[in-house]
Amino acid sequence: MKTLVEIKKIREEKRKELDLRVNLKASTKEKHILVCRGTGCTSSKSPQIIENFRKILKEKNIENVRVIQTGCFGLCAKGPIVIIRPEDTFYAMVKPEDCEEIINTHIIEGKKVERLLCKDVDEKLVDRLDELNFYKKQKRIALKNCGVIDPENIDEYIAFDGYKALEKVLTSMSQDDVIKEVTDSGLRGRGGAGFPTGKKWMFTKMAEGDQKYVVCNADEGDPGAFMDRSILEGDPHCVIEAMMIAGYAVGASKGYIYVRAEYPIAVKRFQKAIDQAKDYGILGKNIWGTNFSFDLEIRLGAGAFVCGEETALLESIEGRRGQPRLKPPFPANAGLWQKPTLINNVETYANITKIILNGAKWYSSIGTETSKGTKVFALGGNVVNIGLVEVPMGTTLREIVFDIGGGIPNGHNFKAAQTGGPSGGCIPAQHLDTPIDYESLGAIGSMMGSGGLIVMDDTKCMVNLAKFYLGFTVDESCGKCTPCRIGTRRMLEILEKITKGSGTMEDLQNLEDLANNIKKASVCGLGQTAPNPVLSTIKYFKDEYIAHIKDKKCPAGECKALAKVTIDPEKCKGCGICKRQCPVNAITGETKSPHKIDPSVCIKCGACVEKCPFKAISK
Amino acid sequence: MSETCKCECGGKDPKLEEILNKYEQDKSNLIQILNEVQEYYGYVPMKAQEAISKYLDMEMAEIYGVITFYSRFTLKPKGKYNVAVCLGTACFVKGSEKLLDTAKEALKIKEGETTADGKFSLEATRCIGACGLAPVFTVNDEVYGKATPELMKKVIEEYKNRE
């Protein structure tokens, strides 16, 4: 147990000790080697990197250097990432066997290990993190502590204003003050729908009930999105603190966080954070001598996309099949065990402590008229800088994809970006200058979504993409309502027909009609948004659908059934590489004379196309 | 119901008892318990379902309903080596379908199946969160990033030669 005075003391002392983490000019002989332990870097061996550093430092008796595990730095494409502070040197794609050289050259000799320095998109060597184009247009609020602190050490969180917002709320603000601050900030739900957060809090506070609950939705289901996971892995205490503030504001004494079981690191760190907070007396009864008590528990999801829908999530916490409930009543009035319940997403919570500490006015000065603050995106797909980015609302898609993301690799062109995952829509090149906010994205047929942002280059078939998303929805439809259960399956069948080359123009019309009906008639958000990828691809890439139907061709060459792999006899030099690549022996030909492909044997895998040194084979 | 568990305990598995006793006898703990059982056995065996049914005082049908609803729970054991290809969007866009095709061909099974000798199972998973390494596949806990069909073939060959 720690008193408020003791916590303040930890904050002061620890902050001094950690000054070199954020102050590049810190005059100290100490160095901190920060190693990313997010899921991405962990799967490329960052735990061994930490172990090696520690071992070597010990062997060499170096005492003023500490090795710290941190959350995600964001630039996942360059992982595993090692950053040395205070000088802020950024080493990319570090291997466990590089540790010795880093210690010898950087730590002992005081020189940079040039071969490991990060290269920017323009091939320029960058030796400081803040010089990278990737970070220049970003503004980190929700991710403030990610990559700065050790997420498994509560003292490091406290050092950077941790639990200070809770202290402010419990000692100097009424419930209404807190709700007013959140309302005035203009914060809207980051799960994707964008409902004003303050209003949600107000409804839950006003609802009558002997017991109320606060829930955190960490069931990040969009395949290709990892914002919430990174926050839980990099800064779990900020979510705990925000849930407590929410609990105080709405009058709840119990919280649940619903996390995907597929996020083992996040689950482990969050549990550790809960234990530490309990140990310090931050979570528990009559916190810091006030009347406020709060308890928090983790509930694991088990792989059902629909559980990201708030009422399905509640069903799942109660131990049942995650099928959504009819609304109204809304969770604010009848949620968990029919009691008033506040549900917010991880990223929404991650903004709360900063709003309380810096004020609504500060927060609402960032962003656009209707969308305040920042948004975190998981940038992925055919883009150079794959990773996690946080930008002010109003930043354009072009800035995210080209300035921050570094553009499209391998000389290809931008074709479309998908926001909102299976519930969102694709955004074509002509809308690249759309500012990112809830309304603008909705107006062009997509949605903000939770933050998945997948970039596609000109080799991608949009019909196939729509089919991919529909396949996902069909798998994940919970089966409760007919339009979603049966309708999405019929849509998928039509898409399969079209990608096989047997579709008709009538099918295309049926597909559109069906899509609009499913949107209108489904019970929950899953069904209401499932047709979006189809509708948006029809809207912007109708010619591709027509090419599949009328010309029996897939312009991008992705749809296997329509592909005809042929060798151009003019370009073929008869080297035989394709023949050796072919898994089904469909290619014949004498050395040094043009080869041929037997279409009846060819499985259109494309292995030969990729390997031909003369680009003589096309699909 | 003739199924026996892998630990040859004669039907009463102390680990199962241990898992159950960690939780209060409250139906809302069902998914928590199933997660631990799945983790321990690699699937949810019939005898575990029976034990849970007794412990939480729930119908077997209700438990079966929950197991089959969530994709993480399986009723059949997975292979010794579980090859999982990520079909999250980031990996899909980078060609993970080809990885899956290669694995299917190399193992001669479809996704969701286990080889007859119980050595391999194949799974198409949703995003595992290593989007920076896309496309990605895993064999048990080992992650293979920036993967190609050639790497898939090589890795499967390596595991075939293992015990």
Image (cartoon, coloured by chain):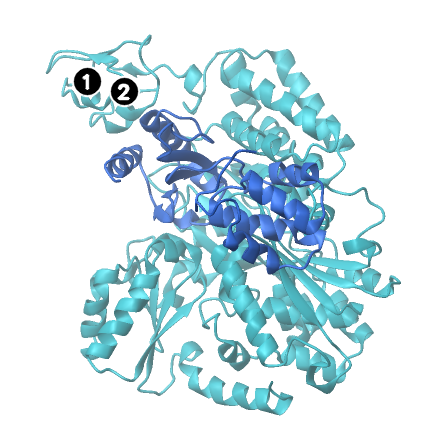
- Chain in cyan, by letter, is A
Whether residue A611 sits left or right of residue B143 in the image: it is left
**Observer-nearest of A63 and A262:** A262
For the residues bearing labels 1 and 2, Cβ distance under 8 angstroms? yes
Indicate the position of residue A529 as horizontal and vertical percent values. Answer: 68, 37
User: Which residue type carries mark 2?
Assistant: Ile
Please report whichever mark, 1 or 2, sits nearer to the chain's N-terminal start.
Answer: 1
Q: Which residue is drawn at 66% across and 51% down?
A: B55
Q: Residue at x 55, y 65 (%)?
A: A271
Whether residue A367 appears in this view of the structure is no
- Chain in blue, by letter, is B
Quarter of the view holding residue A190: bottom right
Residue position marked by numbered label 2 in the rendering? A617
Whether residue A490 sits left or right of residue A503 in the image: it is right
Location of the C terminus of chain A (image quadrant): top left
* Name of the residue lying farthest toward the left: A592
Whether residue A209 appears in this view of the structure is yes
**Observer-nearest of A297 and A136:** A297
Write down the chain letter for disc 1: A
**Observer-nearest of A374 and A464:** A464
Indicate the position of residue A583 as horizontal and vertical percent values. Answer: 26, 21
Quarter of the view holding residue A420: top right
Q: In this view, does B118 lie above or below A50?
A: above
Disc 2 crowd rating (10 Å Cα; few below 14, some 14-19, many 20+) is many
State the SS at label 1: loop
Q: Is residue A602 above or below residue A250?
A: above
**Observer-nearest of A107 and B119:** B119
Whether residue A533 sits left or right of residue A83 in the image: it is right
- Per the model, the C-alpha gap separating discs 1 and 2 is 8 Å
Residue position marked by numbered label 1 in the rendering? A572
Indicate the position of residue A27 as horizontal and vertical percent values. Answer: 35, 87
Disc 1 crowd rating (10 Å Cα; few below 14, some 14-19, many 20+) is many
